[in-house]
Image (cartoon, rainbow, N blue to C red):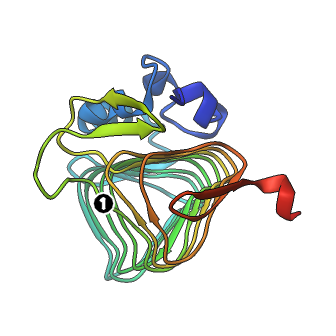
Amino acid sequence: MYTINELFDLDHTLAAEYLSQFTYPWEALAGIKDFIIRLGESLPKDEYTEISEHVWVANSAKVFPSAYLGEAVIVGKDAQVRHCAFVRGSALVGEGAVVGNSTELKNVILFDKVEVPHYNYVGDSILGFHAHMGAGSITSNIKADKKNIVIRDGDEHYATGLRKMGAMIGDWADIGCNSVLNPGSVIGRECRVYPLSMVRGLIPQKSIYKNAGEIVALREEQ
């Protein structure tokens, strides 16, 4: 299993102190809303503006007029929340991150420089520094049978105890266009996922995911 420290560089998020309480990143999902409210109330008032109750936007960030920001949201310095983005709530958008047109966020932590720029759904997920989701790629966060999510790593299974969990995406990982990350996906650092992929379980860091059962080390194609 990938721990928080194996997936993420905590120097690149305002959530560092919060995440450091946990071993595995999905353990942090339940408390994101309360954490964001506490953090927002402590932000420097000369750098962030509370534009509505429990919604803080950095003065250097750009939120386009048609974007929607729900309750318990922080938009970091130099971030962009573009036209028709739907930030439902409980979302930390990191410094320099991009939330694009028609992208929906719910109960997420986006590290600095994350890009979810076109038609993405990201729910109950954590995306690491410089992670990128191609156009139309999504995190599926609930199973069809509504049972609790189990993370699969080969023959090993890890019961999360969660009914809703999307994906944990490591630093610098890149998700190809129109891919679906099934509930409980864990994508290691610097992974590349081919477009149109259906991902399940754990992908080791520095791997290329071509399709189910075909994962190669990144160095093999360099």
Around disc 1, counting alpha carbons within 10 Å, would you say few (fewer than 14), some (14 to 19), or many (20 or more)?
many
Please tell me in which quadrant of the rendered image residue 192 appears. Answer: bottom right
> SS for tag 1?
loop
- Residue shown at 78%/55% (left/top)? 218
Residue furthest to the right: 222
Residue 40 visible in image: no
Please identify the quadrant where the C terminus is shown: bottom right
Q: Is residue 87 above or below residue 149?
A: below
Residue carrying label 1: 140
- Name the residue: 64% across, 46% down: 171
Q: Residue 2: percent from the left, percent from the top?
A: 54, 30
Instruction: Give the amino acid at mark 1.
Output: Ser
Q: Position of residue 153 (x, y in %)?
A: 47, 37
Q: Residue at x 43, y 25 (%)?
A: 18
**Identity of the residue drawn at 37% across and 73% down:** 103
Instruction: Give the percent coordinates (x, y) of residue 147.
Output: 13, 43
**Label total for image:** 1
